[in-house]
Amino acid sequence: MISEIIIKNIFCDIPEKPYNELIEVLLNNPAFKMERIISQGHASPDNFWYDQDKNEFVLLISGSAKISFEKEDIVEIRPGDYFIIPAHKKHRVEFTKSGEKTIWLTLHF
């Protein structure tokens, strides 16, 4: 047994129906931050746009979602889809399905 290694599972410790979107920081240092995000029927507030100082790598692990980028079409993403949102590219979550857990892995760098 390796005592310094802690094994966790990305699908564990998820509330049955989270009232708010759950954002859990998995790793954080000066160079980057990795988060696990759990959505279930959540979306960005009306007229709200994320405008982040860092690039963001996004991987959809399970569920489904629709993302929109300012002045562009809405993009539907499925499990396994990933992309990088450049710093200051305004975006928002339009939709996550209420009947299933949408699990995201994001890396801000």
Image: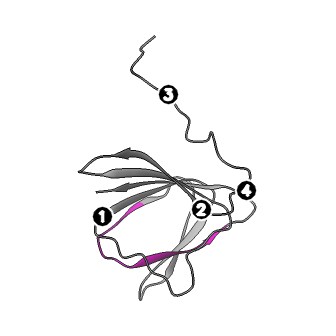
- Total count of labels: 4
Image coordinates for residue 33, horizontal then vertical, percent: 35, 52
**First in residue order: circle 3 vs circle 2:** 3
Q: Amino acid at mark 2?
A: Glu
Alpha carbons under labels 3 and 4: distance apart: 25 Å
- Kindly identify which residue carries mark 2: 21
Q: Secondary structure at mark 2?
A: loop
Q: Indicate which label's residue lies in the foreground, 4 or 1.
A: 4
Three-letter residue code for mark 1:
Asn
Q: CA distance from mark 1 to mark 2?
A: 21 Å
Disc 2 versus disc 4: distance between alpha carbons?
A: 10 Å
Say which of marks 1 and 2 sits in front. 2
Q: Which residue is mark 4?
A: 17
Q: Which of the pair 91/20 is nearer the observer?
A: 20
Q: Which residue is mark 3?
A: 7
- The alpha-carbon separation of the residues under discs 4 and 1 comes to 29 Å
| Residue annotated with mark 1 | 55
Between discs 1 and 2, the one toward the N terminus: 2
Mark pair 1, 3: CA separation:
27 Å
Nearer-N-terminus badge (1/3): 3
Amino acid identity at mark 3: Ile
The secondary structure type at the circle numbered 3 is loop
Q: Position of residue 21 (x, y in %)?
A: 59, 62
Q: Is residue 31 above or below residue 92?
A: above
Q: Do residues under tags 4 and 1 come within 8 Å of each other at their CB atoms?
A: no
**Above or below, 50 relative to 4:** below
Marks 2 and 4 close (CB-CB < 8 Å): no
Write the start and end of the magenta stretch as one range.
83-96
Disc on the earlier residue, 4 or 1: 4
Q: Position of residue 41 (x, y in %)?
A: 68, 67
Dot 1 crowding, Cα within 10 Å, few <14, some 14–19, many 20+ = some
- Give the image quarter of residue 71: bottom left
